[in-house]
Image (cartoon, grey):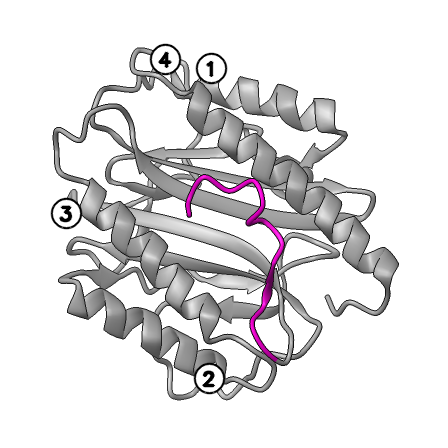
Amino acid sequence: MSITSQVDLAGLQRISEAVGITLKQMREYAQPGMTTKEVDEYGGRILAALGAKSAPRLTYGFPGWTCISVNNEVAHGIPSTRKVLQHGDLVNIDVSAEMGGYWADNGGSFVLGADVHNHQPLVDASRQILRKALNQIKGGVRIAEIGRLIESEARQAGYKVIKNLVGHGVGRSLHEEPKEIPCYYDRYNLKRFKKNSVVAVETFISTRATLAHQLSDGWTLATKDGSFVAQHEHTIVITDDKPLILTEANSIWE
């Protein structure tokens, strides 16, 4: 969407605060020995208390309030009573929601407990690359150039990027124009970021794989080779200078 009034901005700020609070509190709540279902239900209660509705449920009938992906799962992980969290797991929580007709999306990966598998450098790279990318986004910048930056930074850090998962426009629905904000350089993508538009920018930084594959549950996306991916995501408003990061205030990822 494109912001046209202070009413729009206030509505986006409210829902962005709600997803940020939910994400932060879910991260703090998660402990080894819990199931991902327990963590998700906790997140669902927070969203409800804040007056927000789960976006994946509203839009796609997703079987959870949030997406929780663990280890070689990249995205859209279904919360499960059979999935028990362990020390050292690489966990990704993605919270998107709607409130008053406005939508926001916020996500991040973290290491649960002690970093026994040395996932923290990957997590740090994903977070830092997202920060660098956001600092370069303003009205008129080609979307492809942000993809080039993300891919280049990942390569310099010794990683790759997932090429079939992308950022996207957001605001009046979960997925809007631009439909694709990739993590790699696509020379055929001539679109540019537009001032006052709202987008969710994501980094999918991978140890080896470049594609995520759908599992038999019809939702979860994972790497085939068992490699790991860290994702971070913010909803932003594009300006003539640095973007307004709507989901930053309550973020645990900075």
* Amino acid type for the residue under numbered disc 4: Met
Magenta stretch holds residue 251: yes
* Amino acid type for the residue under numbered disc 3: Asp
Q: Is residue 243 above or below residue 63?
A: below
Q: Nearer the viewer, mark 4 or mark 2?
A: 4
Separation of residues labelled 4 and 2 (CA atoms): 43 Å
First in sequence: mark 3 vs mark 4: 4
Q: Nearer the viewer, mark 3 or mark 4?
A: 4
Q: Residues within 10 Å of mark 4 (few under 14, many from 20)?
A: some
Residue at the disc numbered 2: 189
Name the disc covering residue 225, or none.
3
Can residue 55 be seen here?
Answer: no
**Residue beneath the point at 33% across and 58% down:** 128
Q: Is residue 5 above or below residue 35?
A: below
Camera-side residue of 59 and 5: 5
Separation of residues labelled 3 and 4 (CA atoms): 26 Å
Magenta stretch holds residue 183: no
Name the disc covering residue 182, or none.
none
Left/right of residue 132 with respect to residue 60 in the rendered view: left
**Residue beneath the point at 56% across and 78% down:** 138
Q: Do the CB atoms of the residues marked 4 and 1 lie less than 8 Å apart?
A: yes
Residue 228: where, in percent of width, then height? Answer: 21, 45
Question: Which SS class for mark 1?
Answer: helix
Q: Do the CB atoms of the residues marked 3 and 4 lie less than 8 Å apart?
A: no
**Residue beneath the point at 33% across and 78% down:** 148
* Amino acid type for the residue under numbered disc 1: Glu
